[in-house]
Amino acid sequence: SCAAYVLYYLMRLEPFSRLALTLQGGKFDVADRLFHNIASSWKSASEENLQDVREVIPEFYYLPDFLTNTNNFDFGTTQKGKTVHNVTLPKWAKGDPNRFIRINRQALESDYVSKNLHEWVDLIFGYKQRGEEAIKALNTFVHVTYEGEVDLDSMTDPVQRESTIAQIQNFGQTPSRLERRPFPQRLVYSPLKDDKIDFGALPYLAPLTPPFCIVGATHRCKVKRQLTEVCKMGVSGQNSNAVGDMCLVKGQIIGVGRMCALHIPSKSYFRFGLPNNGISVHVGSLTARSRELNKVLSVHDGLHRAEISVVRPSLDGRWIVTGCIDSTVRLWKYESPTVKLRATLCGHGGWKITCLDISTVFGTIVTGCAQGRVLVWDLGTLTFVRRLEHKFKDEKEISSGEILAATSVSVNHKNGNIVTLVGPNLSVFDVNGRLLGTEISLGARPTCAVATDCPEWQENGIVAVTGHVNGEVRFWSLNYGTGELTVRELMVDMEHRTEITALRVTGENQNTLLVGDSAGKMSICKTVQLENMSVNQVAEVTAELKNNLSSYSQQLSRHPAAEMRSNLANIAQQGLGVGDDIASGIRNILPGQPGAMDREPSS
């Protein structure tokens, strides 16, 4: 995509709004030519205007914000009298930009696109980019956009040279041709082969399997404990044996006490809650340089004016966020063995800081206090962004006078979603603070919660895990359409009979959960694999997959036009939905079929 086309789509978002104004000489283009309707843009590019060669940009698959005019720019009125504001979406999106983007992404990740991706590659990078094949495929463009067709160094006329450069920069450049032969079709693996589980295909299905779902059977979530250890580091001097943090080092679980936080990159840990109002750094794992566990590496006094109540290092280890009983939050740049203060964040009104999280991916710091207030801060500008609104909290406190404390806050590092646990209420917010779903946890009181890195398009995935006062662990999924949080898996293990005090999601594919309790026990829990199931269990899964595949075929047969839509460009441009796995079934929404457009996506 060139600058002009990118700005055409992103004109509702800063800083692209300002760039669009600069491109158009200080004002937005005529309203009829602005991006305001998905259908009209598609028709213009596909059939009505031969000069329109726009293509979708990556934001169509992950960023719903570019479809809404949240900044309330005045884009004018079309010739038909329509005020240009938010982008008009297809009927199947039901006016919801999040739903539109989610189904677009499911289509992009579907088997259909994988099987046809090579055809698009042939057009852009392959043998259909130039020559007779390009003409046959209607894939020809202005000559100056092709590599090697224009020799700028030989141009003596400065006006011609500058105009040619401006045309290339603003209106597109064809990429280098990588291959002169057809690209091979991508192999698409299925968990079923000849009505049996294809165990050889499972490793290829693992990367796109949602967190804690069984590889090859994503409609199932099953987690079992594999190993239990006792926490011994950082517990001396504590008033309990409770686990505060854990990680895996070469397959071994490393845990520390409740008043400690692990610094994973350096295999050390911070201890806080000390009389010196600071932290101490200790050896957390034996290495060639450090052969004595718990050895003090450095001490940092007076980091706050009162006792530190919580510490959270960033995953990359460069930042440390500390919270104090006096309600202040401080951000530190950690360069072992020194810590340098970067900012003091105030906004919790004198209440003790109870939980923290930091995401360097999204530049976000999230803080929670004993009064239940959860605030979001910007890591780049070190400023306040917003307060997350928990409506149930205000209603509860007004009716009963009970103060609901924030117990846990956790950031999803794939999409920026924020999981909060305030009192018994589990909530999920998006990166912009919009409430996606909330649920009061019935039964045993929840004591801690952690977010997974499940992307929103994987609707079967686990978005949060909670630990409870009786040792239970619950795995939650979110229906983005209804905002309903549901328990997909309840793990009750005999090893954990007391309050769960720490949780950490780990593993390359987010399939491992570390669990720590108030008795000092730590467990490694992993998603069950089909290879380790009994013959009867595998037979049950096989029957379920066959049933889902049969349902998929029946829905496809009701839409014969779907077979005609084999061109990948159509799929990409229209955002047609096909389920993210067999269990979801087909979601191929086609123009001219209102019954299909109005149907809710299957779960």
Image (cartoon, rainbow, N blue to C red):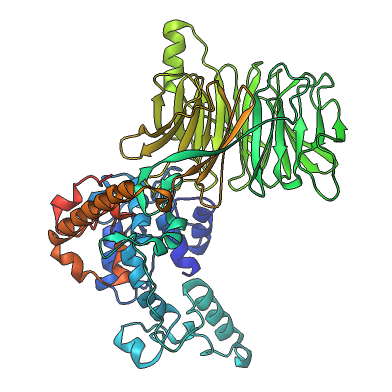
Dividing the picture into quadrants, the one containing residue 201 is bottom left
Residue sitting at the far top: 400
| Residue at 61% in and 85% down | 158
Q: Seen in the image, is 406 located left or right of residue 244?
A: left
Residue 322 lies, in percent from the top left, at: 72, 30
Quadrant where the C terminus lies?
top left
Q: Camera-side residue: 564 or 145?
A: 564
Identify the residue at image location x=37%, y=61%. Answer: 108
Left or right side of 359 for 548: left
The front one of 11 and 460 is 460
In the image, residue 208 sits, relative to residue 386, either above or below, namely below
Camera-nearest residue between 359 and 4: 359
Q: Residue at x 76, y 22 (%)?
A: 273
**Is 526 above or below relative to 550?**
above
Residue 330, image x and y in percent? 73, 31
> What residue is drawn where x is 85% and y is 21%?
276
Q: Which residue is at the front of the view, 442 or 373?
A: 442
The image shows residue 79 at horizontal and vertical percentages of: 26, 57
Report if residue 373 is visible in the image.
no
